Image (cartoon, helix red, strand yellow):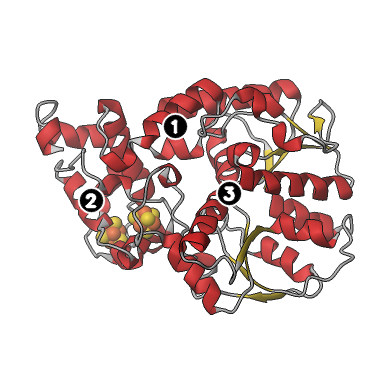
């Protein structure tokens, strides 16, 4: 912060600004360094959350530097921290200051285009709002109407990204075959706002969240199934800040329940060796480890294997905290390490249930020339082949 910010506020004031932005827990740190030991960045390059915390305590944060934009909010260091420093919330507080002053390093520059797209069209991908339900063309998916049991909320990547649209279609087919009474909001759906909030843009998050909440209430939504763990996290844990509570489940939970209640029957075998990857926002942030595995274990023929880092210790794909929109140089991508771990198990398939993970793994698979060795799938894509 010194260089550019010293004109704006001396150290003491900077400490106040950090405090006001929600970074007060920084002062609890006693510099043990455990966060750096577990942080996935230190498998690919040097990065110190401990140092970031120390600088913030003394008001020495270099606001224009790259470091504060690196954290993927994977959640592994808060799990280890003996002083409850709340590294994610505190780290986001620094990004709020940078956002407020409009100071971004080169790697975070794409975020401004994302903001414009979110503000204008409700999605981060520079796509038109009216195209939001195009993924459902040719399927018997109905618009959500009051009285329906379930709102299916695919989220931005599943609505627009060509690879992820396949997952939305697979999910809709599974729900239809199970006889679920569900609908979608189509162009009334907005980005959930989870990731833009992590980049420090609180105002845009609030706007997106309020618009979604208004639509849910006006449409008579009671239960929501989401495909993205990021939508799950924000609907379940952050939208209650607006005094609303919706019954929100991740699609893996919803499908696990359908299988338990015998609403879905699995009629074919799937003879493959499969590794399951725990997305950070499904596992560590929301404690959902078992349901996706239970769904996979029920599929006849599947051999489920675990990778080197799994469940609470899962290795982040690199896409959280807004990093999905930022450029990560070759050689520094966590998803490359994860693909190596999956290949090392002998798995033919790496299965997960998050749009950011699938996007990053598909990229790494091609870059590493593993396109023959391993496939990437969402759980619903396997299910649609066996029901
Ligand atoms: S683990 Fe917690 S207490 Fe230890 S250095 Fe990191 S932030 Fe500070
Ligand atoms: S939340 Fe994850 S990426 Fe961020 S500093 Fe902690 S361990 Fe590193």
Q: Quadrant of residue 288?
A: bottom right
Q: Where is residue 49 in the image (x, y as percent from the top left)?
A: 27, 55
Task: Find residue 114 and name its label.
Answer: 1
Residue 191: percent from left, percent from top: 56, 32
Pointer 2: residues within 10 angstroms few (<14), some, or many (20+)?
many
Q: Which residue is drawn at 27% across and 33% down?
A: 98
Q: From the viewer's side, name the closer residue of 256 and 240.
A: 256
Q: Tags 1 and 2 in contact by the CB under 8 Å rule?
A: no
Q: Is residue 152 above or below residue 102?
A: below
Residue under label 3 = 355
Cα gap from disc 2 to disc 3, whole angstroms: 29 Å
Report x, y in % for residue 232.
60, 44
Neighbor class of circle 1 (other Cα within 10 Å; few <14, some 14-19, many 20+) is some
Measured in 3D between alpha carbons, the distance from the residue under mark 1 to the one under mark 3, in whole angstroms, is: 17 Å
For the C terminus, the image quarter is: bottom right
* Disc 1 secondary structure class: helix
Kindly identify which numbered label has been placed on residue 52.
Answer: 2
Asked if residue 229 shows in the view, the reply is yes
Look at the image and tell me whether residue 200 can be seen: no
Q: Distance between the residues labelled 1 and 2?
A: 26 Å
């Amino acid at each position: 912060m010194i260089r550019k910010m010293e004109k704006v506020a001396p150290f003491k004031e900077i400490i106040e600004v950090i405090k006001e932005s929600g970074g007060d827990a920084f002062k609890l740190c006693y510099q043990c360094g455990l966060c750096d030991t577990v942080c996935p960045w230190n498998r690919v390059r040097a990065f110190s959350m401990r140092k970031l915390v120390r600088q913030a305590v003394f008001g020495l944060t270099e606001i224009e530097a790259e470091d504060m934009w690196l954290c993927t909010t994977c959640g592994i260091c808060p799990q280890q921290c003996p002083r409850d420093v709340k590294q994610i919330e505190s780290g986001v507080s620094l990004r709020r200051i940078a956002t407020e002053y409009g100071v971004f390093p080169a790697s975070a520059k794409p975020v401004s285009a994302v903001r414009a797209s979110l503000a204008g069209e409700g999605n981060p991908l520079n796509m038109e709002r009216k195209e939001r339900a195009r993924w459902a063309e040719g399927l018997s998916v109905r618009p959500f109407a009051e009285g329906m049991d379930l709102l299916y909320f695919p989220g931005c990547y599943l609505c627009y990204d060509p690879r992820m649209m396949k997952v939305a279609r697979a999910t809709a087919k599974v729900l239809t075959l199970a006889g679920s009474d569900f609908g979608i909001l189509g162009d009334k759906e907005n980005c959930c706002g989870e990731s833009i909030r992590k980049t420090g843009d609180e105002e845009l998050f609030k706007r997106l969240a309020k618009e979604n909440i208004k639509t849910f209430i006006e449409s008579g939504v009671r239960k929501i199934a989401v495909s993205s763990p990021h939508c799950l996290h924000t609907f379940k844990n952050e939208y209650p800040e607006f005094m609303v509570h919706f019954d929100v489940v991740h699609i893996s939970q919803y499908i696990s329940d359908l299988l338990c209640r015998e609403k879905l029957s699995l009629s074919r075998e799937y003879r493959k060796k499969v590794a399951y990857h725990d997305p950070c926002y499904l596992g560590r942030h929301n404690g959902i480890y078992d349901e996706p595995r239970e769904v996979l274990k029920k599929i006849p023929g599947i051999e489920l294997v675990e990778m080197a880092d799994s469940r609470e210790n899962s290795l982040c794909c690199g896409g959280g905290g807004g990093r999905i929109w930022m450029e990560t140089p070759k050689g520094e991508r966590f998803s490359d390490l994860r693909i190596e771990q999956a290949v090392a198990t002998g798995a033919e398939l790496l299965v997960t249930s998050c749009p950011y993970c699938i996007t990053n793994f598909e990229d790494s698979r091609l870059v590493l020339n593993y396109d023959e060795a391993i496939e990437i799938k969402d759980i619903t894509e396997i299910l649609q082949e066996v029901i």
